[in-house]
Amino acid sequence: MNNDMLIRVTRYYRALNRLRTIGLEKVFAHNLADAAGVSAAVVRKDFSQLEIHGQKRGGYEITDLISRIGTILGKGDEQHVIVVGCGRIGKALMHYSGFESDGIRIVAGFDNDPLVYSDPSQPIPVYPMSRLEEVVGALKVDVAIITVPESAATDTYAQLLEAGVTGIMNFSPVTLKPVRTADGIMPVVHNINIGLELEQIFYELKFPRS
Amino acid sequence: MNNDMLIRVTRYYRALNRLRTIGLEKVFAHNLADAAGVSAAVVRKDFSQLEIHGQKRGGYEITDLISRIGTILGKGDEQHVIVVGCGRIGKALMHYSGFESDGIRIVAGFDNDPLVYSDPSQPIPVYPMSRLEEVVGALKVDVAIITVPESAATDTYAQLLEAGVTGIMNFSPVTLKPVRTADGIMPVVHNINIGLELEQIFYELKFPRS
DNA sequence: ATCTTTATGTGAATCGTGTAACATTTTCAA
DNA sequence: TTGAAAATGTTACACGATTCACATAAAGAT
């Protein structure tokens, strides 16, 4: 499955869950198209490739669709994440409650500041970086969010790979590049650069496309 | 200019600034390619389309390149942004200092909680939502970051458009769609959905592509 | 029963983008 | 002065993804 398609399918999945809670039972291609911001043709094409079939004229049954897509997306178990770098942004993410509905749970934080990692008021345990490998091994975590300062990002990235964390969401302005590890694993890295994103917005406002 | 290309060009721009501070004067296509995580052919092609020309065998002069790309990207004046929703994430962004080097400044926050908007310890003034239009007009802001809870996102979006803010970076899990306004302006909306991003990482780990 | 409407599903056409190959130009060296 | 090496710049190509068009099937209406 393509990357763009993956995003769309995940959006379909979310939209379907919302529609189900409202009480709907059937859904049409153009509904999902609206929800995901694409055309109905794309939805049908996606489903065609995924071998998902609806009823002609009747649309798709939401319940079936959810379980079908859920399987494709590998849903099921709760997925565990750690936050490395518990400054303001890191703490904000640790407090963020919106992940739960996606089956994602933040299980630990890491920071080198004793004032942070020994603070019992945190809702989630925070450990010093020296315990990274130990905790990651014990909790079987393989995805981490990096919210350390720019200067520490590269080192942190290396330590995470060393500890066996192969999924990374990086909020630092440094662009981290995936490089196959010694044990032949290609890490998955998503770089989210807020400054870059804002710059793009300014550019698009200044030079509108259409 | 393409969206992907815009990202690359912005990356080139950043890399160039870093290289200049180090003291370099010339740069080659493959240097920038490394910095932006693409191939050298892409860099040359980008420059070709932008009508940026280097010296054969000599590469590109960094100073020229920076001013050239700066013009293309519309750099120059400092760009002002507001943060709407001053919860944990909003406050974290208001404190974040990494924007300055990009010429971006957060000039105000908005929140409906009096405990927040009357707190003088904030580094940046926070106003109640009722003063949105007034402040936006006075400060001539046209880009906002939305960090309100999911339930308030749609309303906030409408209020921002109403106030004349046409560039939006949305951190709420609701996907906001750009719709041409009454005065014929097409807003620029970037939805950043952290949960979605994490889900993608889990998927890619579970079903590796290569 | 037949006709119309509605929506799916798929094959073909189109569009855009990255890649690769190569010609071109410059520099350096012998 | 000639040749080799290094880097640019452009053209052609291949691939993928989206859109279009249309066949197909079901439901409802008259």
Image (spheres, coloured by chain):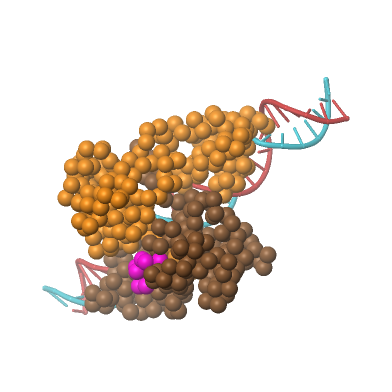
Chain colours: A orange, B brown, C cyan, D red
Residue at the image position 39 percent from the left and 78 percent from the top:
B67
Residue B208 placement (x, y as % from top left): 34, 40
Q: Nearer the viewer, residue B171 or A172?
A: B171
User: Is B147 left, or right, of B134 in this rendering?
Assistant: left
B207 part of magenta stretch: no
Check the picture and name the quadrant holding the C terminus of chain A: bottom right
Residue at the image position 28 percent from the left and 58 percent from the top:
A148
**Occupied quadrant, residue B200:** top left
Residue at the image position 45 percent from the left and 72 percent from the top:
B125
Residue A91 placement (x, y as % from top left): 33, 54
Please give the range of residues in magenta. B94-101
Residue at the image position 46 percent from the left and 56 percent from the top:
B171
Residue B179 placement (x, y as % from top left): 62, 58
Check the picture and name the quadrant holding the N terminus of chain A: top left
Q: Nearer the viewer, residue A5 or A146?
A: A146
- Looking at the image, is B10 positioned above or below residue A142? below
Instruction: For residue A207, say whether it is visible.
Output: no
User: Is A55 left, or right, of B152 in this rendering?
Assistant: right
